Amino acid sequence: MKNIRNILAKGVFMLLVSLLAMACTEKSDWGIDASYSRPFGTNEDGINVTKDEKVARVTVTWDAMPGVEYYILEISKNELTDEIPMGSEENGNLVYGNTVENRILKAPFLIDNLEAGAEYYLRIKSVANGKESYWAYLDEPFKTVTEEDVLNVPAEEDLPVASGKVRMSWEAGLTVTHFEIVGGAAPIERAITAEEAAAGEAWIEGLKIFTAYTISIYNNETLRGSQEVVVPGLEIESTVDEITANTARFSWDNTVDVDQYICQPSSAPTPDDATGAVSLSVSEVNEHAVIIPNLEPSTEYTVYAFYNGAICARATFTTKKGKPVGYTEYNGVEALIADWDDLSGNILVTISADADLSNKSEIPAAVTNIVFWGEGATQPKLTIKGMSVPGALTKLEFYNLNITAPNGYIVNQNAVDGSFADIIISSCTLKTLRGVVRYQQAAADKSLHLEIADCIIDDLTGNSHYGVLQTEKVAISSIAVEMTNTTIANTGVKAATIFRTNTKQGNVSLVVKNCTFYNLFSGEALMRDIIGSTNSFTAENILFAGSGSVKIFNKTSDAPGIINGSKIYSSSDLTVANAGEVSTTALSYSSSQLFPNASSSTDVLDLTFGADIPNEVKIIGDPRWNK
């Protein structure tokens, strides 16, 4: 019996040993023979792969196994099986963690620099004491992001305005080798330094402003992302010149190849885009200029230059007057003088060369309107001697002329029944004359409208000049004077008055805007005898400059009933007196500081503001000097 129990005990022991040996030689156990021992393999159900949504890379996680020293991961775009050896080049395998310097000690593990849109198989094994477990396989292959998008969208600080450069950024340390820049001219390749790759940013310079670029980043031949970038720019310098009644030349800085423009009345809203824009020819693009056609006379326009559909320059200008229609036209004064006594109706005198009309002062009674029109970019010189009318003239007009009347006037009305309904003087230079308009006798029941615009009145001469308007000897129904964008300089040898009416004159409206008065004789008065409740004075944006003093009113009490004055300034070396209710402001600049070219020996008045005068001062007075 004892033997039987011993035999049974030995049999049970041998069975247990056999079972134990079998279990330890399976995939996940240690064998009894040390040459066959393996660490526990990774749990296949615990293997997970998370795909990056912007970069062709994945993060692999798995369940940690006790006693494991490190792990080996292997991927391939081809299927992996136990029969395929680790690192098979034929199968395209990539192995991670199999070298000392690249040991994978724990999860997670990042696999980078994969092919975008590719499918990969994955397996993992554990290593301990120099022994490797069996492979554990991911149940399904994983797929990387379809297209990489590693470039960040440039922020405002990455696109400095008008600098022609952009800072591109990406995750620091990503493997990248170069940019490809497409836009404007031929594609450009720009290498990425090791330092830039490590930092994850690089400046791309030498780009054109107002230009759209596609910037792509590569790792050798592999595209890793792209961004659309529009290089911002400040609006470039532009000029409108050679202005006529119907055309103008628009030019711009050659740093931008303007390709379209829109020219429209300034009252229209700024265009949102280039819809309806005029495309430039190749020669116009290369010359950086275009002639704008089909404009209306006497109209303010704003022209917008476009590049790649964006506004890159703009300029505002006003077309010249257009010749009146329905007039009998004379080319030059010779034929006019020959027909003088027989003139009637509407007369247009086109003057393209210097002319002398000083021997014809009384306009024939049969004339309704007479216009003297200067032709060309340079004002032709016209010499006259005080025009007068015996009857009612509707309009006397001078345009684009250099008018002189030595010791005389442009108008010297001296007929008791005569009247000018409108006297219009625009874009003219009036030089060396005693006065502009003087009324000695006129029809008392008639009105006068005097308009002076865009003129220079220089060198009012004589023992005592008569200024712009002098009607001291006669009172008429009403007087309306508008003087705008005009300069009056260098008056007389003794103090006089710029605007003077009869003391009994009512219904006077005097408007002076955007005008400069320079070097008036000390003690000169802007106005005199314009008094009474029905008379008004409006002044805006006026500059008085020079030495000595100037008076707004001849006497403080010698003022109209209605006064509206604003933005009236003087140089620091000039005293403004008798201003009454008109408020004036003294600048901190002397006349020589404001106008350093005024004392030049040339015969042409130059009151261009000094370069160091601030813009807020340069906008005061006649705008022609703000250059």
Image (tube, rainbow, N blue to C red):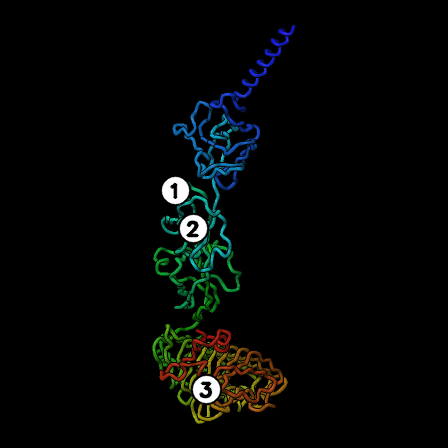
Image quadrant containing the C terminus: bottom left
Secondary structure under tag 1 reads loop
Circles 3, 2 touching at the beta carbon (< 8 Å): no
Observer-nearest of 130 and 416:
130
Q: Which callout, 1 or 2, points to the residue nearer the camera?
A: 2
Circles 3, 1 touching at the beta carbon (< 8 Å): no
Res. 500 in view: no
Observer-nearest of 460 and 160:
160
How far is disc 3 from disc 1 in space, using C-alphas?
Answer: 74 Å
In the rendered view, tell whether residue 560 sits above or below residue 123.
below
Q: Which callout, 3 or 2, points to the residue nearer the camera?
A: 2
Name the residue type under label 2: Glu
In the rendered view, tell whether residue 400 sits above or below residue 273.
below
Q: Which callout, 3 or 1, points to the residue nearer the camera?
A: 1
Residue designated by label 1: 220
In the rendered view, tell whether residue 83 sits above or below residue 235.
above
Name the residue type under label 1: Asn
Observer-nearest of 613 and 217:
217
Residue 540 screen position, x and y as percent? 55, 78
How far is disc 1 from disc 2 in space, using C-alphas?
Answer: 15 Å
Residue designated by label 3: 519
What's the residue at 50%, 33% (across, down)? Answer: 71
Q: Tell me the number on the disc at residue 196.
A: 2
Corner quadrant of residue 583: bottom right
Secondary structure under tag 2 reads helix
Q: Earlier in the sequence, mark 3 or mark 2?
A: 2
Res. 294 in view: yes
Residue 601 screen position, x and y as percent? 36, 84
Residue 186 screen position, x and y as percent? 36, 49
